Amino acid sequence: MKSRLLSAAGVLTLALAPVLGGATPASAAVIASNCANYQQKTFPTSGWNTTVSIEVCVQKDSTGVYRARALVHWVDGGSGKFNNFDLHLRLEKYDVVQKGAVCDFTGEINGQSRGDGFPCETVWGPGVAGQMTGDATVLYDLKDDGVGEFRWDLGGSPSM
């Protein structure tokens, strides 16, 4: 039974490798970036409402590889206003995920009243010019509202 569990875990690791990415060497300098406009949402949190703005981009480096990158800003955070705030970022080719990252901003937003430009990035991956985009979804849970998790689908970046 143990060998089956290990082989199943190995298969799962291989299946998720293209989505979750793996260790990659440091990339060369970013030479191009294509970003969607900042997208903003105000959350009905305790005390002052918390407003979050997120910019979603696709970037290319000098060796021709791509990554998705998001910058997260907020005002009126702090005081443990969220049970969860996860940004699911994706590098996509024709809306098919090539690389992905999940960045948990719960601690940052709950711990600081203001955040300016907190990054979330996928690992670098190969791509084809004109077909690559960055896309993102936020899964969040407001503290003490008794409702559970919500989803905020962000608009993706223009293609690069």
Image (cartoon, rainbow, N blue to C red):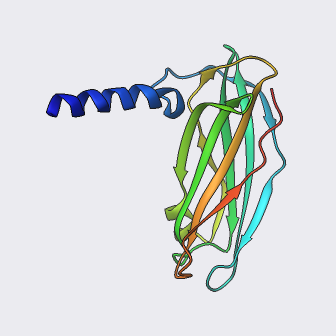
Q: Give the number of marks.
A: 0
Q: Measuring from the top left, give residue 144's x and y in whole percent.
A: 52, 82
134 shown above or below 14: below
Of 95 and 82, nearer the camera is: 95
Of 110 and 94, nearer the camera is: 94
Residue depicted at 75% across the width and 32% down the height: 133
Q: In the rendered view, does 85 fall on the left or right side of 8? A: right
Q: In the rendered view, does 129 fall on the left or right side of 145? A: right
Residue depicted at 70% across the width and 16% down the height: 62
Q: Quadrant of the C terminus?
A: top right
Q: Measuring from the top left, give residue 35's x and y in whole percent.
A: 80, 39
Residue 141 picture quarter: bottom right
Q: Quadrant of the N terminus?
A: top left
Q: In the rendered view, does 15 fall on the left or right side of 102? A: left
63 shown above or below 69: above
Of 148 and 34, nearer the camera is: 148
Residue 81 picture quarter: bottom right
24 shown above or below 90: above
> Which residue is outermost to the bottom?
47
Residue depicted at 26% across the width and 26% down the height: 7
Q: Measuring from the top left, give residue 61's x and y in whole percent.
A: 69, 21
Residue depicted at 80% across the width and 52% down the height: 38
Q: Measuring from the top left, give residue 122's x and y in whole percent.
A: 58, 35
54 shown above or below 113: above
* Res 33 seen here: yes
